[in-house]
Amino acid sequence: MTKLSHPKSGYNQLWRGMAYDSVETLRAIFENPRGHTGKGYRSADKARRGCAMCGRQKHQNDFSKNQWRKDPGHSKCSDCIEKGKSTIHTTHDCEEPISMSSEPRSSLTILFLGVSSWYLDSCGDTLKNESAVITEQELLQDPTKAKIVNVSQKFRGVITTDDWFDVDREYQPIANSIIRTLKDMYSAGGSVVIAITMGVFSVPRQISTMFEFDSSWTLTAYTKRSITATSVGRQILGDAFPKQHVYTKANFVRAPEKDCLFIEYINPEDYEDDSDYDEPPSPSRDSPVVMHRGPNGGSLSYFGFANDLDVSYGDIILKLVNHCKVEKNGIDDQKVEINYDCIQCDADGCA
């Protein structure tokens, strides 16, 4: 193993000897339609003065001096304004416009945003084949790629990692753009998954506050336990967690019962001959995977598993992105939450 310094924070980690830029990326949706790439195109006059709809270059002679200086460059020419048929929406900071997608959400891909290549490899081919990827290394080279407008109309879910919530000051603008994209996806009814790579202890509490949950999440332990799926977990994960119980290492989060997909597994036979126990102890209700379902049908999940040999990262994350409705099943005051874009879900009780 090669010990590499983490590129965003001061920590050192054993990154399994893998390079950050070894994964093929799919980025056609982010390309400049007029062929200008990199920092240069923003200052190139032709790129800034082209019509956002037809691409025809606008001429300075058609503007007063003040109008020309204030023109953002991606606005429409007079002919296109009259037609009123533009479907172009621009990025947060007036970067190159990105065309709106007319596809239903069920046919859209999943976006890995700022994820390292070794973590992508942990997720397996099934999830990667359904995903577009903007790697961590790409964001460090071009921070504007973290800014995606109307993200829920281009992707059905966004996956990122917890190390973006604890960065050095120089990387904070990139982290802020990622968080804004996550908020946009969640507010629009899409799915957000935050997976652990650094295991930053403050992240569960940060995101529950940041996304204004009714109850906070708290990371309580990084340890090994036997776990089994809760009734909510079985409905959401289905065959993605086929075993009755698994002994695994993970970050465990304390959250409301309706958000917890797993619970500690206690085998009664282990305590039959133990004189210290009259009956088996109560299981810990802290869960390595928690999901909060928002008022608009969106979801935010924290994925705390730390060993892909114990559980299938890709299968579980795919279910978190494509989650279906959860029936009231013995949990007090739990409302039936529905994601109307549920796709390819075979969980019990999914309508």
Image (cartoon, rainbow, N blue to C red):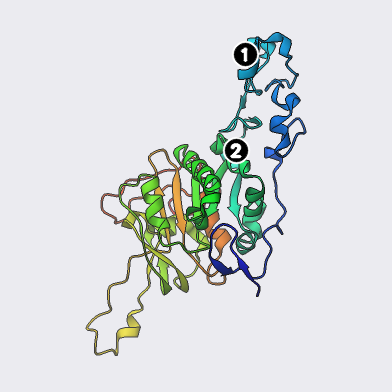
Left or right of residue 50, residue 249 in this image: left
State the separation of the CA atoms marked 1 and 2: 33 Å
Left or right of residue 346, residue 138 in this image: right
Q: Residues within 10 Å of mark 2 (few under 14, many from 20)?
A: many
Q: Nearer the viewer, residue 335 or 113?
A: 113
The quarter holding residue 44 reads: top right
The quarter holding residue 202 reads: bottom left
The kind of residue tagged 1 is: Gln
Secondary structure at numbered mark 2: helix
Of circles 1 and 2, the one toward us is: 1
Q: Earlier in the sequence, mark 1 or mark 2?
A: 1
Q: Residue at x 59, y 47 (%)?
A: 110
Residue 341 percent coordinates (x, y)? 51, 41
Disc number placed over residue 154 in the picture, else none: 2
Q: Quadrant of the N terminus?
A: bottom right
In this view, the residue farthest toward the left is: 278
Q: Nearer the viewer, residue 90 or 193?
A: 90
